[in-house]
Amino acid sequence: MKRPTLKKTVSLALACVLSLSLLAGCGSSGSGDNSDKTVMTIGISADLSSLDPHLQNDTASGYATRHIYSTLVLLDETTNEFVGDLAESWEAVDDVTYNFKLKEGVTFHNGDTLTSEDVKFSLERQKESAKVGHLVSMIESVEVVDDLNFVIHLNSPSNALISSLAHMGSAILDKTYTEELEASGKTLADAPMGTGQYTFKEWVPGASFELTKYDNYFDPERAAQNDGLIFKIIPEETSRTIALENGEIDVMLNVPANDADRIRESESLALDEFGSTRSEFLLFNVTKAPFDNVKVRQAMNYAINKDDVLTAMVNGAGKTTNEYFNSAAIGYEEVDGIYTYDPAKAKELLAEAGYGDGFTFTCYLAGDARNRAATVIQANLQEIGVTMNIEMMESATFYERTGKGEHQAAISGWIANAEPDNTYRPLFTSYSVGDGGNRSFYSNPEVDALVDDAAVNPDPAAVSADHKQILEILVNDAIWVPLNEWTGMVARQANLQGIGLSAIGMERFEGLHY
Amino acid sequence: MYKYVLKRLLMLIPVIIGVSFLVFFIMSLSPGDPARTILGETAPIEAVEALREELGLNDPVLKRYVDYMGGLLHGDMGTSYKSNRPVFDEIMGRFPATLKLSLWGMLFAVALSIPIGIISATKQYSLVDGVSMVGALLGVATPNFWLGLILIIVFSLNLKWFPSGGMDGWKTYIMPVITLGTGCMASITRTTRSSMLEVIRQDYIRTARAKGVKQRVVITRHALRNALIPVITVIGLQFGYLLGGAVLTETVFSWPGVGTYLVNSIKAKDTPSVMGCVIVFSIAFSIVNLLVDLLYAFVDPRIKSKYK
């Protein structure tokens, strides 16, 4: 038998591998002509959980429900003001009574006309929901006056009513349709029906969901400019980018920072960048030494080079910040962040605090981006004689352990939504210490009182003043090192128009067209 | 024979109890609160508590397990925390996709690997043997996640032959099937080769050849049938690997199967869904193993006589 062929074989195999890699490296991109497309395909990373607005509270489900149903009010993201959607107008009679008037002639997809009874039914059904009921817990009752007029009675004053009514969990359902459907043993999740720009066509779990344009949508100015939407679920980041490059999808959400440059360089693609309400920060457990000492926390604020952290974290796609509230979010007030990168000053403060020789602590975190940030912070702190050990864990473990206060410090983040109280209350008050969101375990009666006042005070100027004062206190108390705010990114075919971007992850697609 | 099949099917019960017990307790010991995961960080503590109560998460673990198994006995796999839909419906909507992918992957692997293995064995140390053995080594060593991405870049992005993902027409099957089947193909090729080599060195093969039986007949009739037993064992085991490998392949190719669903359910701490997936996987794996054992009987009459 012949033997000396092994060398030949190995060379052949290597040649195959090499040519495969070369083939992978070269080649064209560009997706051909798509200008006659009328149904738009959007690539998203996760499947939706339910098409019943009262049984879901996740971003993916929101993509579908936002286009099938309507809410009473809507956030106009160009002005950050709430405007009427189904509601023609509303006014606060006193701080617990709101009069609403519906737009005339709004029809559901089955032809039924929208009335106040539908609103009452929907909000009462929502209150029973474990997933979105808390949003309307301030509502005592809905009183129907006539077909178009109704009154919302609150159980106590709240500034969060209007923003809560803009949440997809407060979508308005057709009372007759939903009751009959549920009586027949079916669920709204299987046959969703609302007053939105699109009717539901199909949901293939794990694969896609499809919507078709509703021709009798009540607001011609906001009617769909395409014939339908297909949301395609592509969990893997690279596959999602390739699908966009191939023209298999028209829009790509959740753009990975690594692929941003590639998309920017491509002639056939465009990358829309906008301020998102996501903030990242290094937080301290203020009940644990050495971070129970405000001087130590302030020293940390001087010691970290935030530009380097931003580069390491998201390749620079964002901006550094010294503040405790995202500058793109509703409820933001500009305050002087004081701290700049100044290691000498940091050392001075440490010496004053009695830690002139430095100290060692452990920082908890979850996720690769935060781990990259931690490596930079670790090096920065080394310069002032502080040793930071990094403990990386899976996110569920992270939230559980930091919720229990096992940490000395942690790198965490927050995405603000349309209601400022949903950020101020969980992050900074003593009511939500630990698992409630305040993982600094910071407790300050003054801040609590200001948050409480901001939540109910009917005077917007007073609310702004409250917010400003809270943020100033936080800067002085230095419970975090605020790190950065991320840029939101949506990629699309270059010649596609009409995308509705959103700082809070509520993108709209009815305007899409070539 | 029937008695044997029945006995094996009854063996499924302790398997399911064991697997479900382990997974249920691992899920409940692992940190993270499903209610918090579902509602997100911005939800107030009271809302999280209310949802925990509704999902029954405040009951002791053992009670929840017993309740779950009680439901399972009645064919009720519970309701997904995340979607509020019956887990059985969720899984059955996706399982055919995973099964199709796994079966095609297996078919691809078997159809290529057995002939290659036979040729390699009969032409030991030839160029063909060398190429196929190096190929098999690469096949075993290549992570299917990586292979999937390379295939997408080459055949979807650059050559534009196939779509990059989804399950829509035969074109979408090709890359996932190759990705999933390659690792399997490599193992089966190696097993076929070594098993054949062992058999063709035996005396009765020499006798057959001495009698003047044609090479083709010697190989297919005399040698292959005897060499197949270990190959079938490997195929059976590889099927379990395929179901597991489907988790990664499905993610890369956006394949709407149980694999992706399982991963998402684990992330969401959706215990009923995770349990459902694991139980379905265990049953599928056990049944495939049973089929493999039954197949032995057809290949080897000596084993058939033992079943009686």
Image (cartoon, rainbow, N blue to C red):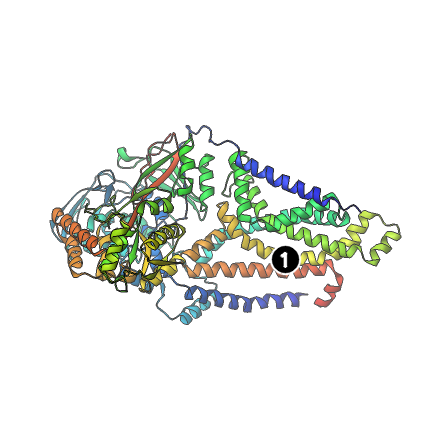
The chain identifier of the residue carrying mark 1 reads B
Q: Is residue A364 above or below residue A78?
A: below
Q: Quadrant of the N terminus of chain B?
A: bottom right
Q: Quadrant of the C terminus of chain B?
A: bottom right
> Which is more toward the observer, A80 or A353?
A353
Quarter of the rendering containing residue B82: bottom left
Residue matched to label 1: B236
Residue most extreme to the right: B211
On the question of residue A8 being in view, the answer is yes
Q: In the image, what residue occupies the spot 41% across and 36% down?
A: A263
Q: Residues within 10 Å of mark 1 (few under 14, many from 20)?
A: many
Q: In the image, what residue occupies the spot 67% across and 61% down?
A: B294
Q: Is residue A241 left or right of residue A99?
A: right
On the question of residue B111 being in view, the answer is no
Q: Secondary structure at mark 1?
A: helix
> Which is more toward the observer, B159 or A251?
B159
Q: Is residue B171 left or right of residue A50?
A: right
Q: Is residue A86 left or right of residue A110?
A: left
